Each structure stands twice: as C-alpha cells, then as structure tokens.
Amino acid sequence: MNDFSVNNQLMKKLVIFLFIIAITISSLQFPRMEEQIFGVTGVSEVCFVSNEKFEGEFEVVPCGEKFFNFCSFQNAKDNANLIKNSDAVQFYTDQDNIKKLLSDIKFQQLSSEEVEEIQILYGYTPYYDSSILLDGKKVNVQIAMTSEKIVVGFPIILTGY
C-alpha cells in the first residue's frame, strides 16, 4: 500500500468521525420540537386532536372523524411523541400563567381580533413545525382568552374556545 492510499483512508475515517461528533453536538444543543413545546410552565390540561383514539391516561371525546384526547400536562410531557400523530395540540391555562407561557414558546404576535368578548391572538413560534397561512403569513399558534380561561392551540384551536 502506498502513502497516498493510507492517507486517503485516514482522511475518510477522520471525516466520518467529525461528522458523528457534529451530529452528537447538534442533538445536544437543539432540543426536539416536542421538548420545547412541553418545556413550558403553568399548563393545567392538554388536548391532542387526532384521527386516532389514544390509549392510556387520556379522556377521549370523539367528534366526527376526530378524537379529542385530553390529559394532564405531565401525561402530555411523558407522551410528547404523540404530537407527530396529531392535527393540533391545545394547552389550557389561566391569566396568571399566560405571559410566562408566551415567553417560553417565544410567541411572535402577527394579528389579533375580539369576537364576543373573546380576545384571539394569532402568531408564530419557532418550536412547532405545522402551520397555516393567514393573510400570507405563517401562523402556528392561536390563543383564545376569556376572563376564565386561556386556550393555546398549535397550529390552531380545533376544540372551540
């Protein structure tokens, strides 16, 4: 074997090693989407809207072809991977927690409206992949606020306010 062949093999091994190191570091520095969304505080209940009825500690409400799979926030965190099987996810909280929650998800408000004493905000978070277009803008968070409760929907609220 000549020196060129040995150096070429060593270079290939070094490139592969550096590639593996880069992937490992990036996975440590950039948490998965589910970890970011479920890293918030102050959420009392979660609803996964899906075509599937979830098993386990869920209160399931069928609605047409969809299932509203309600659970505690801790159960949602423990089953965060179910977000991939869901059309939408809703968080339920109250006025005391909304500012912290919006900060935690890095909410960027794009528009708002008021309908029958319900304040509705539309915006964007970098922590949720699915989105809809609203007036040509990418929206993946909808928030409905009443005096009693707040519903935060990713990408929109599908269970009603």
Image: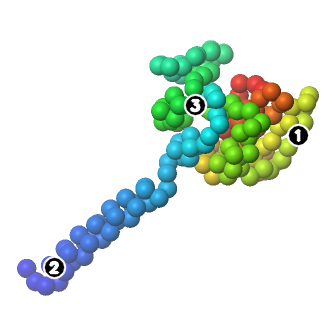
The disc at residue 161 is none
Question: Amino acid under label 2?
Answer: Ser
49 horizontally vs 52: left or right: right
The residue furthest front is 96
Q: Which mark is residue 113?
A: 1
- For residue 9, what is the image quadrant? bottom left
Question: What amino acid is at disc 3?
Answer: Phe
Residue 117 seen in the figure: yes
| Residue at the extreme bottom of the image, as rendered | 3
Does residue 124 sit above or below 158 in this rendering?
below
Residue at horizontal 20%, vertical 75%?
A: 10
Q: How many marks?
A: 3
Q: In the image, is 90 to the left or to the right of 55?
A: right
- The N terminus: image quadrant: bottom left
Dot 2 or dot 3, earlier in sequence? 2
Instruction: From the image, tell me which residue sits under label 3.
Output: 73
Q: What residue type is labelled 1?
A: Glu
Tell me residue 142's x, y (percent). Answer: 74, 39
Name the spot of residue 31 as percent of width and height, x first.
Answer: 49, 51
Q: For this view, does 114 lie left or right of residue 93?
A: right
